[in-house]
Amino acid sequence: MFWDYFHIGWDHIINRNAWDHLLFIMALSAIYVFKDWKQVLILVTAFTIGHTITLILATFNIIRFSSSWIEFLIPVTIMITALFNTLMKKFTPKSVRLNYFLALAFGLIHGMGFANGLRSLLGKESDILLPLLGFNLGLEAGQLVAVLGLLILAAIWQGVFKVSRRDWVLFLSGGAFMAALVMAMERLPFNL
């Protein structure tokens, strides 16, 4: 049972249909390099904690939100994160602290994106603690693999091709922002 839900959490991130979550991970981690691995680990864990809180609250029917609004807000979180990255002047541990809070807060919104599906899966289980743990550990593992891939790309572009860190951040953040903008426009929960 644990491994089944671990696999579901893993697939929630490492999946060709998980573009919104991968874009968010890309925007969140765009400002980091390999030497920042501890900060990145805290960042990814903050996102998972936010995701977990929402999943628990939704599973117990404590909170419910319109899925059309959640699907719209997910790309909005990507756009805000990407915009924040472009406004940063320095990438010191002190200057990126706000990123942890963004990851935690936006993790709450992203958690709602899968809450309905997970709630229906967990409805069959008598004990939901182990499935939730498995799902969230799978999610965390998937996020760490995605971030590792981005850090490797950053090292290649910055080390081999001599792209400045600032230009790399602007490139990744700009790409994430534009993709999220298109996604948000496609998911508008109201008619213009």
Image (cartoon, rainbow, N blue to C red):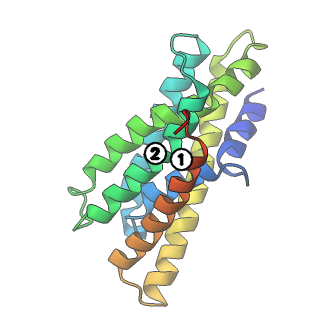
The residue at which mark 2 appears reads as 76
Depicted 141 relative to depicted 36: above or below: above
Q: Position of residue 125 (x, y in %)?
A: 76, 14
> Are dots 2 and 1 in contact, CB under 8 Å?
yes
For image coordinates 50% across by 62% down, the residue present is 178
Q: Position of residue 133 (x, y in %)?
A: 61, 28
Going from N to C along the chain, the mark reached first, 2 or 1, is 2
Which corner quadrant of the image does residue 117 belong to? top right
Q: Residues within 10 Å of mark 1 (few under 14, many from 20)?
A: many
For image coordinates 54% across by 72% down, the residue present is 152
Depicted 63 relative to depicted 91: above or below: above
Depicted 162 relative to depicted 7: above or below: below
Type of amino acid at the residue the image marks with label 1 = Ala
- Checking the image for residue 3, the label placed there is none
Nearest the camera: 189 or 134?
189
Which corner quadrant of the image does residue 40 belong to? bottom left
Q: Residues within 10 Å of mark 2 (few under 14, many from 20)?
A: many
Nearest the camera: 54 or 176?
176
Nearest the camera: 80 or 129?
80
For image coordinates 32% across by 64% down, the residue present is 86
- Checking the image for residue 184, the label placed there is 1
For image coordinates 76% across by 34% down, the residue present is 3
Label 2 and label 1: CA atoms lie apart by: 7 Å
